[in-house]
Image (cartoon, rainbow, N blue to C red):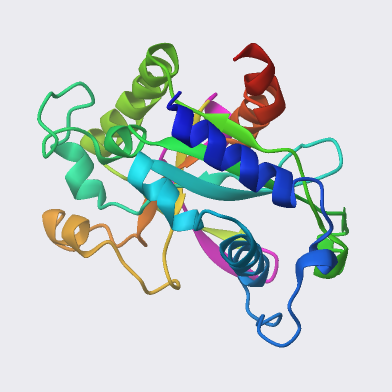
């Protein structure tokens, strides 16, 4: 790991690690009613109180991800990557040396990831008040060749399904209906899956719809890291552990 990266992350960790959100809220400036309020509050606090602006990590190809977890660091949600057309996946190659031909997901995994856990309590599908949330122990993930190969195998499975044809079905859901498909599911894999990543139910994957001559109208999708895999990463790559080993 780059020494400069270690210094930057260590300072940020010392600044906000294991602190309550209510300790760092600026009631005069922070928009506490915004859906993404907490990540913005944390970013603003770091930028105003650290020697380093959080954006400097981009210069080192590091992506910051805020992960919602419970007190045992079990995450509540999978982690999304940028949305991509299923049409593009058909023509991508996981191992291609050419960036433009290589899988978009593979290119995104060329980055390192700083996970900032947000510890919450969830009861009956509802989180406790956000000013009672806590910033947990950081984790730092640099995808290694073994992990990339295993993820690549599941990406290949996803591509094969798309090649054979995406199948949509409308099924009963309570008193209404919802659409299901045969894309790679979280319950079927260890590392990644595909799921919607759209603004709304009408935000369609137009390139793929055009490719199928309108036969398949599916909302925009993206690859997501499975919850169980994120749990493993949070445990295996704890920032404190990395510092001790270094």
Residue 61 in percent (x, y) is at 36, 40
Q: Is residue 116 visible?
A: no
Q: Nearer the viewer, residue 76 or 200?
A: 76
Q: Quadrant of residue 220?
A: bottom left
Q: Is residue 204 magenta?
A: no
Q: Residue furthest bottom?
A: 28
Q: Residue at x 46, y 26 (%)?
A: 142
Q: Residue at x 82, y 45 (%)?
A: 70
Q: Is residue 178 magenta?
A: yes
Q: Is residue 224 above or below residue 38?
A: above
Does residue 238 appear to the left or right of 170 in the view shown? right
Q: Is residue 104 above or below residue 95?
A: below
Q: Nearer the viewer, residue 207 or 27?
A: 27
Q: Nearer the viewer, residue 137 or 167?
A: 137
Q: Nearer the viewer, residue 160 or 200?
A: 200
Q: Where's the N terminus, which quadrant?
A: top left
Q: Residue at x 71, y 26 (%)?
A: 240
| Range shown magenta | 173-190
Q: Quadrant of residue 200?
A: bottom left
Q: Quadrant of residue 28?
A: bottom right
Residue 158 in percent (x, y) is at 34, 32
Q: Is residue 108 visible?
A: yes
């Amino acid at each position: 790991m780059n020494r400069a990266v270690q210094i930057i992350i260590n300072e940020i960790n010392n600044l906000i690690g294991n602190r309550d959100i209510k300790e760092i809220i600026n009631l005069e400036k922070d928009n506490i009613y915004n859906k993404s309020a907490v990540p913005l509050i944390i970013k603003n606090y770091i930028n105003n109180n650290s020697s380093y602006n959080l954006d400097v990590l981009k210069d080192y190809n590091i992506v910051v991800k805020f992960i919602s977890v419970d007190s045992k660091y079990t995450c509540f949600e999978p982690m999304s990557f940028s949305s991509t057309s299923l049409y593009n996946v058909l023509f991508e190659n996981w191992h291609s040396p050419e960036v433009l031909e290589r899988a978009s997901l593979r290119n995104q995994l060329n980055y390192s990831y700083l996970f900032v856990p947000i510890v919450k309590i969830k009861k009956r599908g509802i989180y406790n008040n956000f000013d009672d949330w806590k910033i947990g122990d950081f984790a730092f993930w640099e995808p290694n060749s073994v992990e990339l190969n295993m993820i690549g195998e599941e990406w290949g499975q996803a591509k094969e399904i798309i090649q054979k044809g995406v199948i949509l079905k409308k099924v009963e859901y309570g008193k209404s209906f919802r659409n299901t498909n045969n894309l790679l599911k979280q319950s079927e894999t260890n590392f990644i899956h595909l799921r919607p990543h759209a603004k709304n139910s009408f935000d369609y994957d137009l390139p793929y719809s055009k490719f199928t001559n309108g036969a398949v109208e599916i909302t925009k999708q993206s690859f997501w890291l499975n919850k169980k895999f994120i749990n493993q990463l949070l445990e295996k790559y704890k920032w404190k552990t990395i510092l001790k080993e270094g």
